[in-house]
Image (spheres, rainbow, N blue to C red):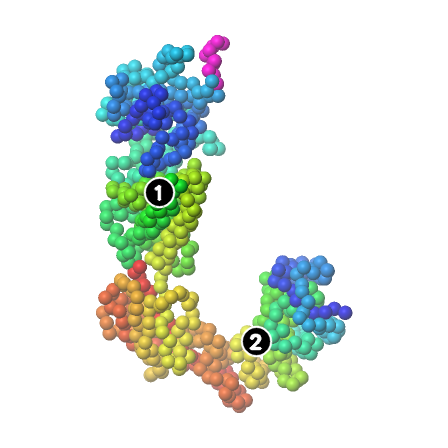
């Protein structure tokens, strides 16, 4: 594995708090103290040795600043309980591959520097890089996946690695300078990891559009591909150290999907600054009738990576501490408890709840029934009996409903008004005969429907649909049914739907 | 002497294929005790048992004509208010614990799905709990101890199936008009007429109509 454009493994052999010590020397310790760090437990690097059949990992690094020692730097480490060199030289702990140097008590292996390191690393199979290509290359000796039932070939392994990178690291790969490539010697080719070609493509599109500032706030989601961003509040509690409560925000970017059968439709990708998806949460069943979507919840430094605010950094720190060692969810952890006063668990549950609420508000089609009409008309048009009563004020109201037999068919009229919300909206009109219990017996086909405002009317099958522009609030309508028997009561159903958020 | 009890919803698992088929003839009352509570007043089942047994003895298994006699017997012997009879637990107790063989005698086992509802589902539908259906149909058709309408209504499979699944069945004069006119009608005719009648009553108030008017309406629905 090679990284480029980084500082390299800086720091002396025994210098605390350096990249070199953190990656190569200190086990179960992380020097990632800053708010934007990815990990926090120092466990991540241990996988390097776990994946080596010989528990051996080699590091070759080109440093931005070598302190006169010369690039590159080379060192290796074998994780051992103890080991011996011949019958008389026994050592406790790991074995090191490097230059033997005398110490006050015995000898030890230290990093090899400069031309010697270049020569040895070349012989070990490291690719040469010039001094401008700063960064670190890691060689896992005798790579073997301990979790796999069977050894994957290098090509298949590379494919699986690319897929996993695309699935979980696309937030950090959105910027062109952070492209990742995967090259396999066996296949002899270098393949760019392209999240845009994976199942996660809708998330990537939403995220990149958001970073480019192209996603409008609280905009209507009317057709597949439409996007909007909503800011969801989060309250970080006071710390034991006396830092005050912080009221922050995270960004929920929602993209309307074409259909619910799309891969990962209905999922929300949660992540923070370092740009690794912590989890995908399936929220497709939040409510009946929810439109399909893909959503991204960018938190902490991730909310606006170019210029995070103080509160973003507070959120970043809070969420980092809420991640268990696997970094696969946000939950109350001992670290949160040790750092924050009461309210840290509630902050997490509230965040989830508010995200759900925001999704519902954006994605649930609003079916509404309006005010009650005159008693006699109510009997004929039992509007509002069907469907859920909903909460709060209705977004639509109806007025002037009338229906009467005329020339062997029903002639009906009325008006529907949008009382709340913005953006385009639509109305579906249906007629049905009902029996003595108010149960629909059969649909009565609508033959024609006209409106007196600028709106599009489509009569298809037995249903009339009216699509109304955002600036029209009231739609008076008049229609006729197909010829019918007038046997029973007629039910007129008007279903208003906000196609905007 | 046995007393009427109420079977609690927790006893749903007792409706098994073995019970429906008769492999399990009946459950030991003591064994299902945790799922039963006493009916709110003492109601001995001695007369009920005798009457039901007599009907069984006089009808072959699966005989449709048993319905009228069963309905009358059950209704006569179980003097319940409508509020009391609205508790599905008493009908479940009778069918699942007390006299499951009566249900099996009336209906030959064909599928567990249907048989299951005849033990458990409350109401008057054709596939509802047998005792519940018999009692309620009798309740909706009896006129001052006269069960002749009950017998006629249940004598037609099509009529009892389509009539007692509709809300109009709760209006005695309407039921009477339907039975008088449709008791001997072909099944398809009954089904269509009741569907149209249902729609008609969406616009008309049956309670305000006399016998002649109701019968006229049923005839109009029949076309």
Q: Residue B41: x, y in percent?
A: 68, 72
Q: Nearer the viewer, residue B173 or A56?
A: A56
Please identify the quarter of the rendering in which residue B137 is found: bottom right
The overriding secondary structure of the stretch rendered in magenta is strand
Q: Is residue A477 left or right of residue A328?
A: left
> What label sits on residue A243 in the rendered view?
1
Q: Residue at x 63, y 60 (%)?
A: B11
Magenta stretch holds residue A83:
yes
Please identify the quarter of the rendering in which residue B5 is found: bottom right
The answer to whether residue A295 shows anywhere in this view is no
Q: Residue at x 48, y 33 (%)?
A: A149
Magenta stretch holds residue B68:
no
| Residue designated by label 2 | B164
* Region in magenta: A82-91
Say if labels 2 and 1 share a chain: no
Quadrant containing the C terminus of chain A in the rendered view = bottom left
Please identify the quarter of the rendering in which residue B18 is found: bottom right
């Amino acid at each position: 594995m090679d990284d480029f454009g980084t500082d390299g493994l800086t720091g002396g052999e025994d210098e605390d708090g350096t990249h070199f010590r953190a990656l190569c020397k200190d086990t179960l310790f992380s020097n990632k103290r800053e708010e934007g760090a990815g990990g926090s437990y120092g466990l991540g690097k241990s996988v390097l040795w776990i994946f080596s059949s010989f528990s051996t990992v080699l590091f070759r690094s080109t440093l931005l600043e070598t302190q006169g020692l010369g690039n590159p730097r080379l060192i290796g480490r074998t994780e051992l309980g103890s080991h011996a060199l011949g019958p008389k030289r026994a050592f406790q702990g790991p074995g090191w591959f490097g230059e033997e140097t005398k110490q006050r008590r015995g000898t030890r292996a230290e990093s090899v520097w400069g031309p010697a390191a270049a020569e040895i690393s070349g012989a070990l199979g490291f690719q040469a890089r010039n001094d401008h290509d700063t960064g670190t290359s890691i060689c896992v000796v005798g790579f073997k996946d301990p979790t796999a039932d069977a050894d994957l070939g290098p090509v298949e392994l590379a494919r699986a690695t690319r897929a996993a990178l695309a699935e979980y690291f696309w937030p950090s790969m959105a910027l062109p300078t952070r492209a990742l490539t995967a090259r396999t010697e066996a296949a002899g080719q270098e393949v760019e990891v392209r999240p845009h070609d994976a199942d996660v493509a809708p998330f990537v599109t939403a995220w990149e559009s958001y970073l480019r500032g192209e996603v409008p706030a609280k905009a209507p989601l009317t057709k597949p591909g439409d996007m909007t961003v909503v800011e969801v509040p989060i309250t970080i509690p006071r710390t034991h150290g006396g830092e005050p409560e912080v009221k922050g925000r995270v960004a929920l970017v929602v993209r309307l999907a074409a259909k619910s059968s799309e891969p990962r439709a209905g999922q929300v990708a949660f992540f923070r600054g370092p740009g690794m998806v912590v989890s995908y949460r399936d929220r497709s069943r939040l409510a009946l009738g929810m439109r399909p979507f893909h959503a991204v919840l960018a938190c902490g430094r991730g909310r606006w990576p170019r210029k995070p605010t103080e509160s973003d950094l507070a959120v970043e720190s809070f969420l980092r501490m809420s991640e268990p060692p696997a970094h696969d969810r946000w939950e109350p952890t001992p670290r949160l408890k040790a750092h924050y006063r009461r309210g840290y668990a509630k902050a997490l549950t509230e965040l989830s709840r508010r995200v759900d609420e925001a999704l519902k508000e954006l994605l649930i089609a609003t079916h509404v029934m309006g005010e009650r009409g005159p008693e006699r008309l109510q009997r004929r048009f039992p509007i509002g009996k069907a469907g859920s009563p909903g909460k709060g004020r209705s977004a639509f109201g109806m007025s002037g409903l009338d229906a009467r037999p005329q020339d062997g068919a029903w002639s009906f009229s009325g008006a529907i008004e949008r009382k709340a919300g913005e953006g385009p909206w639509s109305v579906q009109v249906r007629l049905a005969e009902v029996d003595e219990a108010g149960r629909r017996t059969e649909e009565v086909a609508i033959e024609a429907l006209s409106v007196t405002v600028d709106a599009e009317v489509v009569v298809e099958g037995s249903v009339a649909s009216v699509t109304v522009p955002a600036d029209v609030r009231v739609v008076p309508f008049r229609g006729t049914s197909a010829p019918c028997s007038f046997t029973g009561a007629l039910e007129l159903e008007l279903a208003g739907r906000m196609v905007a958020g | 002497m046995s007393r009427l009890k109420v079977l609690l919803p927790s006893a749903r698992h007792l409706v098994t294929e073995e019970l429906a088929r008769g492999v399990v003839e009946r459950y030991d009352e003591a064994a299902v005790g945790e799922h039963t509570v006493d009916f709110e007043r003492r109601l001995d089942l001695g007369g009920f048992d005798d009457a039901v047994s007599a009907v069984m003895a006089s009808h072959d298994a699966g005989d449709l004509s048993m319905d009228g006699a069963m309905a009358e017997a059950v209704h006569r012997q179980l003097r319940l208010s409508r509020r009391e009879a609205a508790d599905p637990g008493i009908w479940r107790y009778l069918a699942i614990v007390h006299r499951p063989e009566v249900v099996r005698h009336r209906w030959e086992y064909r599928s567990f799905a249907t048989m299951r509802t005849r033990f458990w589902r409350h109401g008057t539908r054709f596939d509802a709990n047998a005792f519940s259906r018999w009692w309620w149909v009798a309740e909706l058709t009896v006129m001052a101890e006269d069960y002749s309408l009950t017998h006629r209504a249940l004598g037609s499979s099509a009529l009892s199936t389509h009539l007692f699944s509709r809300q109009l069945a709760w209006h005695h004069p309407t039921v009477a008009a339907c039975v008088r006119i449709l008791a001997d009608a072909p099944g398809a005719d009954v089904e269509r007429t009741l569907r149209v009648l249902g729609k008609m009553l969406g616009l008309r108030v049956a309670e305000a109509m006399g016998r002649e008017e109701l019968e006229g309406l049923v005839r109009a629905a029949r076309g």
